[in-house]
Amino acid sequence: MTSVLEINGLRKTYRARGGPRRALDGFDMQVEAGQVHGFLGPNGSGKTTTLRTLLGLIRADGGRMRVLGEELPKALPKVVGQVGAIVESPQFFGSFTARDTLSLLCDAGNVPQARVDWALELVGLNERAKDRVKTYSLGMKQRLAVASALLKQPRLLILDEPANGLDPGGIREMREMMQRLSEGGMTVVLSSHILSEIQIICDNVTIISLGRRVAAGPVSEVLAAHSTGQVKVGLESVADLPTAAQLLLNAGISVQQQQDHLMVSGVDKPAAISRLLAERGLFVSELTPVGADLESVFLELTGTMPVPGQHRSVDDSVKVAQA
Amino acid sequence: MSLMRAERRRFLKRRMIIWTLVIFVGLLATIGTIVFFTTEKVTPEVRAAAQAQADRMYNQQMQEFQRMRARCEQSPSDEICQQGRFEEPQREWFPAESFMPATFNFRNDSEDFVVTWAILLAMFAFIIGASFVGAEWRSGAMMNLLTWRPKRMQVLGTKLMALLGSLTVFSVLSFGLWTAAMVGIASTHGTMERMTNGAWQSYGLTGLRGLGMILAFAALGFGLASIGRHIGLALGMALGVIILGQFGLMAVLFMARVPYPEIYLIPSHLQAWMEKRVVIQDPFAVVSPMDEVPTRILSFGDSGSIGLGVVAVVLAVAFYTMRRRDIAN
């Protein structure tokens, strides 16, 4: 597979009143052609800085970036026509209509005006195209932003929180649209905090924390790598739980007794638990491998799991050691 | 060219710009209407009416004088008679010209109206220039545009060219209409006497200098708003310059008895630019009432060079910051 986007050792430090703040600290990322790639990270982790740097809005202090095989930022004017992007909240001139907004972008980017209606249709704004943007809801502005990114019919589509402000129907439409675009050969980089959506839509993910990559790869592999390997075990009689726990411990298996079930870990084949207990006349009513979801992996990797009674600062994330 | 087309379209679609220009045209129309209704062409009838009024006034004054003289002959001890405060009115004190209505003389008056046109449009051009780029920054539309056209210098330069080009077209059109209106008023309610080729040339050159001033103010507003990435910076700077830089500076200059204080004030330079020269006096060099007040000439070349320098510096900073600064919000 060819890389559409490659980032190596990207560094960016902001000068701030409280002293310099490292937004990107040797960040790496790789996106292959045709992927729908999730780009995840807590607030302040460097996601938007990465996207802005890619788009030439921010000057990097170091590192390398390549998009569609071209070195950035030098070749950005050459490849920008093939990169559609929305960064953060949708930003448009409120007094213009949606049609005017897209039409002006077409003129600015040498894109045929015929694409305006196509893009408006694609995001479901055709009937409101003549309304001023300031009358739009956040979700409608978000749709317009996506339409503006699609006008170029790009090879690489970068969307920062595209589902922000969308209603559930809109989120589903957005998901289906991205799947269609991906099937059509477009590579999509998707930054979002709706992790269940990312898990459904994306083939691959990159997780960033405090300016460094903490995990990357196919979603299934990232989940598997952080799976606990635990099995939930239920018995016909709750009264038998202590006896069963003792039996498993004696067999060298790690077990935790919960109120109405046991959590067993370190077992390759869950059937072995069933067999062991059945030999002593204890019959299991539930034997469920506990899988990890993207949200729990994200919270674990970034160290942003909420702790009751504690308030977390935006910078209280996990920082990985430099490779 | 596509970017230029987009920027020209953007300029014409901006409601604030359109409304600003409409208000400007409305102001000119108001001034023109006032001039139209307050001036009158000199006709034999008008002259005869003025002569009749002058005669009437002379006769009234003569009657009053004769009444007073009779009174003083009867009572020479009256205080007013003692003081001899009255004298016989003379016919030449009541010329018909004093009773003529105001007449718009294109040759004498038109340059004042060109200055009015230029100063009004320059003020509006400053606001338009600041708004054209400032609102783009504030709304985020500039950032959006840069994700399409990442060559920042080209984007800012094209915006500036679109602004100056559009304003040039509007200025020339409005100057033409304003001139036509003035000619119309002069022809129907005034006079076009002594409008020689030289007078027209001088009129045209004043208009050209006015156009230069309008474009300079537009570029200044554009540059300041671009540096601050907000229209507010340009308007704040303008207010600051007017309040502190002019009133405050004037007070300081006069307190410090700086020679030729008016040479440091913007209105003197605007006047010099539009009227080709202005005589600046040094009030502090006068020791006794018999002394002649020393003067200096401020030419439009001097003022033009200073103005051009200021605009060049502001635009240079604007382009430098556009090139160097991150676009982080």
Image: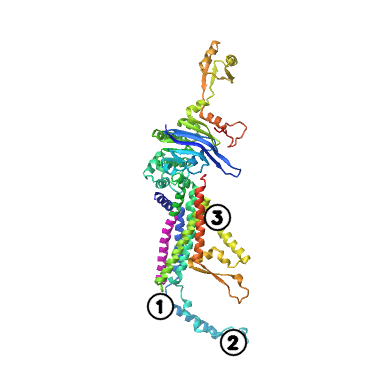
Mark 3 vs mark 1, CA separation in Å: 55 Å
Label 3 belongs to which residue? B236
Q: Please tell me if label 3 and label 1 are on a single chain.
A: yes
Mark 1 vs mark 2, CA separation in Å: 41 Å
Question: Can residue B178 be found in the magenta stretch?
Answer: yes
Q: Amino acid at mark 3?
A: Gly
Is any part of residue B32 visible from this angle? no
Q: Is residue A94 above or below residue B119?
A: above
Q: Is residue A261 above or below residue B304?
A: above
Task: Check if mark 1's residue and mark 2's residue have beta carbons within 8 Å.
Answer: no
> In front: B323, or B27?
B323
Q: Give the letter of the chain under mark 1.
A: B
Q: Nearer the viewer, mark 1 or mark 2?
A: 1
Q: Secondary structure at mark 2?
A: helix
Task: Check if mark 3's residue and mark 1's residue have beta carbons within 8 Å.
Answer: no
Label 1 belongs to which residue? B44
Label 2 belongs to which residue? B72
User: x, y (%) of residue A278?
Assistant: 53, 12
Is any part of residue A279 visible from this angle? yes
Please tell me whether the stretch drawn in magenta is mainly helix, strand or loop.
helix
Q: Amino acid at mark 2?
A: Cys
Which residues make up the magenta segment? B162-191
